[in-house]
Each structure stands twice: as structure tokens, then as C-alpha cells.
Image (tube, helix red, strand yellow):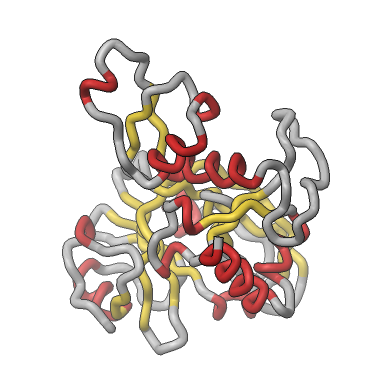
Amino acid sequence: MIEDIPAVADLEQGATYHRITLHEEYGGTQFRGIAPCKDHPYVFLFAGDAGEEHGYRDEFRGDTFIYTGEGQEGDMEMTGGNRAIRDHREDGRELHLFESNDEAWSITYVGEFEYDSWFTDRLRDTNGNEREAIRFRLEPVDDEVAIEADDLEALALETLYDRAKGNSVSESELEGATQMRYSRSEAVREYALRAAEGVCQGCGEPAPFTGRDGAPFLEVHHLHRRSDGGPDHPDNVVALCPNCHRRVHYGEDGKTFNRELIARTENQ
């Protein structure tokens, strides 16, 4: 169902909107993936499968969204929309990410993000030639959850699950205690890794190696895309080895495999 365009602060994650109506309300070009709004403090970002034919590749890596910059031919440059992403805080603008759907001009709101950093990657341009592509690491803007602990690792698994759902501790619990603040996504990630106990929840094999932090190396996978609702919830994540994680996103049977993972989680 296509929703009416509300105030940007009232956009709902998972809700579907009409892109043309969005631009009529706030401005920004209708035909680019990066759309800074001239008269409003927003930069709208659009991701989707259609961009892959021009060499754009966007994906979640854990809680971080990797967004490929603009420029169809040759090496990308830090100008235009790319600069607008990098400098959005200095410019006083918010980044809002949408996912394009199969239906023309239909978009789903993913959420508000902040620029973290950028790097270059060798990707093909619209002509199939390899080039230096700019890719941005974007972090979700989440409500923080107050947690009474020196760090997340100090929490019991059951308590961590409760915090990952977004339940904050009471004022009485916080009285006299050291209060740390973590985003909900951090708590969800920690829960997924802890619950897996070092075993891939895809293939059932132990993690292939130990990470620099001394823990078994697994990657957190969201069973349902953020745009499909409920991304920051412990019931929506599993921990996978790198091979199974790539299989979900790039394998010929990736969608089928993801459905299997969802079924396993629901039957636990």
C-alpha cells in the first residue's frame, strides 16, 4: 500500500511511498540515486537492484550499510552527491535511505543513517569497464538503550536479549551504577554472536577462524531486510560463517537458503 508522504520525522520504516510525491514535497532530483534537497535539510538515498547494471552495489554488512556513490562512467570523484553524503553533518543535513521496489516509482523507507567513512573498490561501470568506485559506510541512527553494565559482554544472555529488544532498565536499577549507552543494533549484534556459541547457524560448522578480538569469527545476518520491518530485533538475526553469508546474498539459491534460515529460527 502506497502511503501519503508525512513529515520526514514521521516516515515509517518498512512503509511504502511514491518517489515522485516525495520529491514534489521536498525537492531533489527524481532520476539519481543521491538526491540532496535544495530547500530542506535532507539528502535522500535510493538503493535497489536496478542500479547493478550500472555498476552500483549496495548492501548491509552487519549493521553498516555500504552505499556505492554516483558516477556511471570512469572513476568516481568526491563531488556532487558523493560530497553531499560525506559532508552531510557539516551541511546540517540528514541522510534518509529508501529501497526501490519493482513497481515504478515505488520506494520503501529503510531509515535514517549517518556517514561514517568511505573507501574505494574496483567495480565495473555502465560500460563494463573496471573503475575506482567510491563506497560509503553508513551507520543507522538508532535510539540508544541505557544499559547498566561496563560493556555488553558483561550481560547474561537472557538480559542481553531483553536489552536488544529495546527494553531499558528502570531509573531505580540505574541509581548508583555506571551507565553505558549502546545503540540497539550493537546489542542485537552482540546477542546474535553470543547465542551462536561460535557455530555457524547456516551450515552448523564451527567458525572458520578466530578474529582479532579472540572470538570465533562469524557475521551477523538479518533474516528480513530492514525495509521489511523489524531489523533491530534479536529474533531477526543469525550468525553465519562468511561462506554462508555470501551464499545468502550472492548465491543462486540465496533466497531459498534465507527462507530455510527463517524457518529454522521460527521452529526453535
Q: Front-most of 246 and 78?
A: 246
In the rendered structure, the answer to whether residue 251 lies left or right of residue 29 reads right
Q: In the figure, 7 relative to 143: above or below?
A: below
Residue 160 placed where, x, y %?
46, 37
Tell me the residue at 72%/70% (across/down).
124
Tell me the residue at 27%/82% (across/down).
2
The answer to whether any part of residue 69 appears in the image is no
In the rendered structure, the answer to whether residue 53 lies left or right of residue 143 reads right
Residue 185 placed where, x, y %?
45, 45
> Most extreme residue toward the front, as rendered?
268
Q: Front-most of 67 and 246?
A: 246
Q: In the figure, 223 relative to 215: above or below?
A: below
Tell me the residue at 45%/59% (across/down).
81
Q: Front-most of 91 and 2?
A: 2
Tell me the residue at 38%/47% (across/down).
165
Quadrant in the picture for the N terminus: bottom left
The answer to whether any part of residue 43 appears in the image is yes
In the rendered structure, the answer to whether residue 155 lies left or right of residue 36 reads right
Q: In the figure, 115 relative to 48: above or below?
A: above
Q: In the figure, 5 relative to 105: above or below?
A: above
Quadrant in the picture for the C terminus: bottom right
Count of numbered badges drawn on the protein: 0
> Most extreme residue toward the right, as rendered?
208
